[in-house]
Image: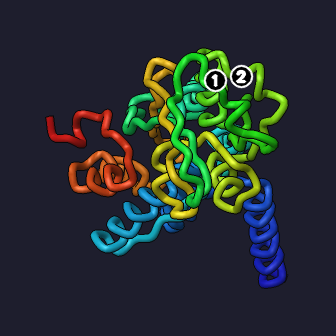
Amino acid sequence: MGRIFDIGRRFLRTLLVGAAIAAGAVLPAMAQNRDLVVFAAASLKNALDDAAQAWRRETGRTIAISYAGSNVLAKQIEAGAPADLFFSADLDWMNDLAAKGLIDADSRVNLLGNSIVLVAAGDDPREFAVQPGFDLAGALKDGRLAMGNVDAVPAGKYGKGALEKLGAWDRVKDRVVQAESVRAALLLVSRGEAPLGIVYRTDAASDPGVRIAGTFPDGSHPPIVYPLARVRASVNPDAKAFLDFLRSPKVRPLFEKQGFTILDKSVSGS
């Protein structure tokens, strides 16, 4: 009878553990043994993939990186997704999580800067002076303008704000095709599905199918800042270590190679 009771108790414990996992709970011991999970803006893919490879060469440990629009990732973290670090393409979505107590405020750092550009297909030789009075509607001809979602995706919000300031938004707002991320918008231009698009300079550099046709002046939009922070619920010891690794001078060339500017002084060693 005692043996049957022990078997039943072990079976019940197994069911409880399984239920906890199914419900999204992560046991501390399991969290310590799993790969580090980083939620990162889609525009970081090339640079962050290189950084993850450098980390693996140095430590022997791997990292799982989920790329999407910052808005999508922030909502997933809010819903309890098991992310250890969040690397956003703008301050708004990081601020949203901070206001809800979902990130470790002491770990937060504004790491990178970027800029937005107008891109055209690689075989389109046109150049545009992006300035007040810019006739973007005329440049589109019968085509559409590819952008990230202008209400949620950071690059889309920056692009809409810049076009409003330059006086071009009202004439093109009904001709915008809004993508779920800046990389998706880039792909629309690269595939020839849209003649022009607004993306980050770093995205334009990542795709040989497009070329930069114009650059938005700095004063046309707020500074583009990429904040990085540990998710408060994370218990993975590699979270702080990898965050510090991304801030180290050895990673700086990987970001600069993709066209990012370094905002965090500790990276430059100054």
Kindly identify which residue carries mark 2: 169
Q: Which amino acid, mark 2?
A: Trp
Determine whether the residue tagged by mark 1 lies in a helix, strand or loop: helix
How packed mark 2 is, by other alpha carbons closer than 10 Å (few <14, some 14-19, many 20 or more), is: some
Determine whether the residue tagged by mark 2 lies in a helix, strand or loop: helix
Q: How much space separates mark 2 and mark 1, taking CA atoms?
A: 5 Å
Q: Do the residues labelled 2 and 1 touch (CB within 8 Å)?
A: yes
State the image coordinates of residue 86 (x, y, percent, origin top left): 53, 44
Kindly identify which residue carries mark 1: 163
Is 232 or 195 nearer to us in this picture?
195
Residue 265: image quadrant is top left
Is 105 or 27 nearer to us in this picture?
105
Q: Which amino acid, mark 1?
A: Leu
Residue at point 43%, 37% (across, down): 114
Residue at point 78%, 84% (across, down): 3
Residue 171: image quadrant is top right
Q: Give the mark, 2 or 1, whose residue is nearer the N terminus.
A: 1
